Image (cartoon, helix red, strand yellow):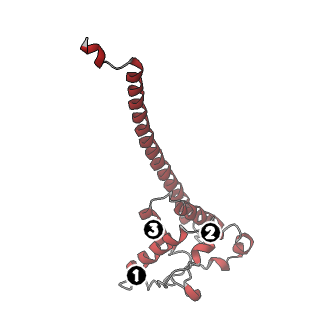
Amino acid sequence: MIYLIDIHPWYEVGADIATMISALAIVFLIIEYNASKNTRNIQLMHRCIDIFREWFNKPNQKVDIPYLELLNEEFFYFQKRLIQKNVAIEWIEGILDFIQVHGNSGVLLNGYYNQTNIESLAEWENRKVFFARIRYFIYPKLQRNIIIPGINEKSHAKKKRELAKALYKHIKTYPY
């Protein structure tokens, strides 16, 4: 008779089983969400890499509308944290080799190479409204100017990384 008193009603046992199944389902959903997010991020990275390679391998390589469209897309991914931070910083370091970035009072921060002033492009004037995110990037409001010295200077890589980190932090604050 004592054994019958200790047995819980069937609906309580069923509720406990349902709770355990629900907890396992939530854990499974979190794992699946993270896995699909990582897969999506890798796909975005590969897409950008493929577009960049196609642009970079053109015989007459120059900053043009397809490159600006790629930049705009990359900046959106950086802003929304869809590309890992370390990858984004590395990409920004590469971007600094192609376009000019200006600091406080219009100081050129990366004049070590033959970077393009994108505002001087004929195509820019007609499409600058569509590239507001790029304009935000090339005129960051940094607390101090981080000027990258020449390629042969010892501190070139360090300053380039420092500016890339500051620009990454900056692009994440783009309001739209």
Given this view, does label 1 or label 3 mark the residue nearer the observer? 3
Query: Label 1, on which residue?
Result: 156
Mark 1 / mark 3, whichever is N-terminal: 3
Q: Nearer the viewer, residue 13 or 175?
A: 13
In what element is the residue under mark 3?
helix
Q: Residue at x 50, y 59 (%)?
A: 81
Query: Where 33 falls versus 161 (above or below)?
Result: above
Q: Residue at x 40, y 39 (%)?
A: 27
**Three-letter amino acid code of the residue under disc 3:** Ile
Query: Which mark identifies residue 89?
Result: 3
**Three-letter amino acid code of the residue under disc 1:** His
Give the image location of residue 46, x and y in percent. Answer: 49, 54
For label 1, the crowd category at 10 Å Cα-Cα, with few meaning under 14, some 14 to 19 and many 20 or more, is some
Picture mark count: 3
Q: Nearer the viewer, residue 100 or 89?
A: 89
Query: Label 2, on which residue?
Result: 133
| CB-based contact (under 8 Å), mark 1 and mark 3 | no
For label 2, the crowd category at 10 Å Cα-Cα, with few meaning under 14, some 14 to 19 and many 20 or more, is many
